[in-house]
Amino acid sequence: MQFTKIVRLIVPFCLIIVHLTESAPRVDQLYQEYKSSKSGQVKTRIIRSLINNLTHYDDNDIKNIEIIIHYGLNEKEPLVVQEAIFAAGKFKSRSLMPELNELYRKGCNQYPGSQSIIKQKIIKAIGKIGGDESEKFFTEEIIK
């Protein structure tokens, strides 16, 4: 009799896990949605969803994610840019270092009122990415 009660408690929990796993959007779907969207809120949500599913990606997904982050770094809306910067650090995307570097040096001026926040986020992201390029960035830009 107790076994039946335990099964009743475990089965609904398992169904929830299966349902959530099946309903997670694929990276290629998010990529298409990002490209077709004009909304900064939608683009920010897409980048956040990529970060939230961090452990479930293969090499092809990572390539598409870096493309989405690249687009995000070049958006006009500061919130999308900030989310893309955070994602670049979270994914430790070394291929995006030149863009982060350039954004730090020149691009922040196009975001009035958000320059210092964007610069702070870039510094954190570059610190997370690490490597020789990060070291070079810190010695050339921060320790001048």
Image (tube, grey):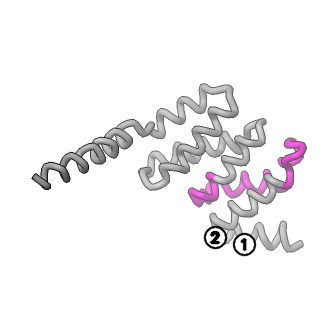
Q: CA distance from mark 2 to mark 1?
A: 6 Å
Q: Residue at x 59, y 60 (%)?
A: 92
- Residue 8: assigned label: none
Q: Amino acid at mark 1?
A: Glu
Residue 37 percent location from the top left of the image: 63, 27
Residue found farthest to the left: 1
Please state the horizontal and vertical placement of residue 143, each as a whole percent of the image: 85, 74
10 Å neighbourhood of mark 2: few (<14), some, or many (≥20)?
few
Residue 34, image quadrant? top right
Residue underneath mark 2: 131
Span of residues in magenta = 87-116
**Secondary structure, magenta segment, majority class:** helix
Q: Residues within 10 Å of mark 1 (few under 14, many from 20)?
A: few
Kindly state the secondary structure of the residue where label 1 is placed: helix
Residue closest to the eye, 88 or 46:
46
Q: Please, what secondary structure does the residue beneath circle 2 have?
A: loop
**Residue visible at 71% across and 63% down?**
124
Could you tell me residue 82's position as x and y percent? 72, 48
In this picture, residue 58 sits left or right of residue 46: left
Q: Residue at position x 78%, y 70% from top?
A: 138
- Residue at 28% x, 42% y is 15
| Residue 73 in which image quadrant | top right
Q: Is residue 28 above or below residue 143?
A: above
* 3 relative position to 34: left or right: left
Q: Are marks 2 and 1 in contact (CB under 8 Å)?
A: yes
Towards the viewer: 87 or 14: 14
The amino acid beneath tag 2 is Gly
Find residue 19 and report its image quarter. top left
Horizontal and vertical percent position of residue 69: 63, 45
Q: Which residue is mark 1?
A: 135
- Against 107, residue 98 (above or below) is below
